[in-house]
Image: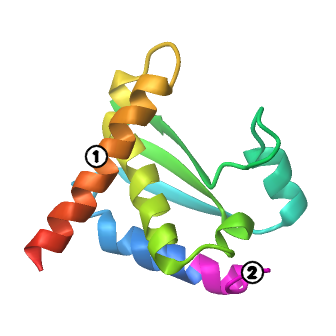
Amino acid sequence: MPVQSVKATRKIIRKYVNKWVTPMGLGWWNVDVYYHMNKKEALKYFKTKKREWMVLGRTLSEWEYRTAAVHFNTHALSSCSAAEIEKTVVHELVHILVCEMREGTRKHEEAVVVGLERAFQWVREAAK
């Protein structure tokens, strides 16, 4: 059962993207954001090898051109709290920052992104 509608979720995602892009140093990047709102489309685009869960977001980037496309599984995020949505947004934006290091599997990158995502949240909280 969704916490909010997919339209309301898209609005929340947009709010957090706007909140975080500049403080994270991404203002000079061309970042396109896509909201996948249809359940069938989301199942197709965000499914994983582990069928019991789906990815909440995907980030594709061309670091040499400072361009990125961030895709959000708006349907799945509609059952998340605002704090979880913000965490997902920060997580996907951090992928843009570390995309140059991508080689081989994504496990190393994913571990770095999780650590940095938390660090950004802690810094923002400490700054308050």
> Is residue 96 in sight in this rendering?
no
Quadrant for the N terminus in the image:
bottom right
Tell me what residue is drawn at x 32 percent, y 63 percent: 21
- Residue 74 lies, with reference to residue 67, above or below; the image says below
Give the farthest residue toward the left. Answer: 127
* Amino acid type at mark 1: Leu
Q: Is residue 38 visible?
A: yes
* Neighbours of disc 1 within 10 Å: few (<14), some (14-19), many (20+): some
Residue 35 picture location, percent across and down: 65, 65
Query: Mark 1 — residue?
Result: 116
Whether the magenta-drawn stretch holds residue 3 is answered as yes
* Residue shown at 54% from the left, 60% from the top: 33
Tags 2 and 1 in contact by the CB under 8 Å rule? no
Indicate the amino acid at tag 2.
Answer: Pro
Q: Residue at x 77, y 32 (%)?
A: 49
**Marks 2/1: CA distance?**
29 Å
- Most extreme residue toward the right is 40
Q: Find the residue positioned furthest to the front.
A: 52
Percent coordinates x, y for residue 17 in the rendering = 42, 68
In magenta, the rendered stretch is 1-10
Quadrant, the C terminus: bottom left
Q: Nearer the viewer, residue 3 or 27?
A: 3
- Asked if residue 5 lies left or right of residue 40, the reply is left
Q: Secondary structure at mark 2?
A: loop
For image coordinates 39% across by 34% down, the residue present is: 111
Q: In the rendering, which numbered label is found on residue 2?
A: 2
Give coordinates of residue 78: x percent, y percent: 68, 75
Q: Secondary structure at mark 1?
A: helix
Left or right: 1, with 81 as reference point = right
* Quarter of the image where one finds residue 112: top left
From this view, report whether residue 36 is shown above or below residue 62: below
